[in-house]
Image: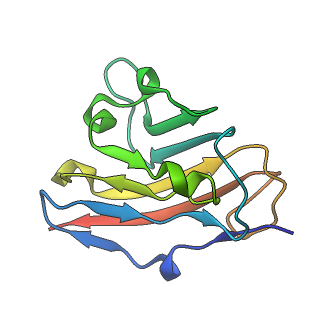
Amino acid sequence: MESASPPLLNKPIIAAPGDDVILPCRLDSEEDLQDHFLEWIKLEMDPDPIKRRFVYLYLNRKIMTRFMMETFIQRVSLNPDGLKRGDVTLKIRNVTLQDEGKYRCYIPGKNLSTPEGDGGQIYCSNMELWIF
């Protein structure tokens, strides 16, 4: 049975304004996720003025920028080669104080049994980013 690797014991990721950061998330298997749906959100954050709430949204090999928060569109990315191997690690470039908080990656439709997964879904949750 597949599962997700938890982020390094949920230790916070610490960065300074202007740094690039990596939010790690990957399946234990090397399943190809290029044709799946996945989302990254920042927890406890209100949607932007036009109700977009996603930090990153991906569907069937396409980045769905029209649903992403404007402040993240030009600064976030996944490694396309990583997706081929079950790696959905998110890179955020040029972090700001407003980026501080908890993040979650969610992949619906995966029948996985992990502490983070529930109801056939998997996500890496509560990855905390601190900006100093």
What residue is drawn where x is 82% and y is 51%?
A: 120
Quarter the C terminus occupies: bottom left
Left or right of residue 74, residue 18 in this image: left
- Indicate the position of residue 122 as horizontal and vertical percent values: 70, 56
Q: Which of the 4 image quadrants contains residue 31? A: bottom right
When the figure is inspected, residue 105 is found, relative to residue 69, above or below; the finding is: below
Quarter the N terminus occupies: bottom right
Residue that sits furthest to the top in the current view: 50
Left or right of residue 19, residue 81 in this image: right
What residue is drawn where x is 60% and y is 64%?
A: 26
When the figure is inspected, residue 62 is found, relative to residue 31, above or below; the finding is: above
Residue that sits furthest to the front in the current view: 81
Total tally of numbered discs in the picture = 0
What residue is drawn where x is 53% and y is 54%?
A: 81
When the figure is inspected, residue 89 is found, relative to residue 62, above or below; the finding is: below
The colour scheme used here is rainbow
Q: Which of the 4 image quadrants contains residue 2? A: bottom right
- Indicate the position of residue 22 as horizontal and vertical percent values: 36, 63
Q: Nearer the viewer, residue 50 or 32?
A: 32
- Indicate the position of residue 109 as horizontal and vertical percent values: 79, 44
- Indicate the position of residue 66 as horizontal and vertical percent values: 42, 20
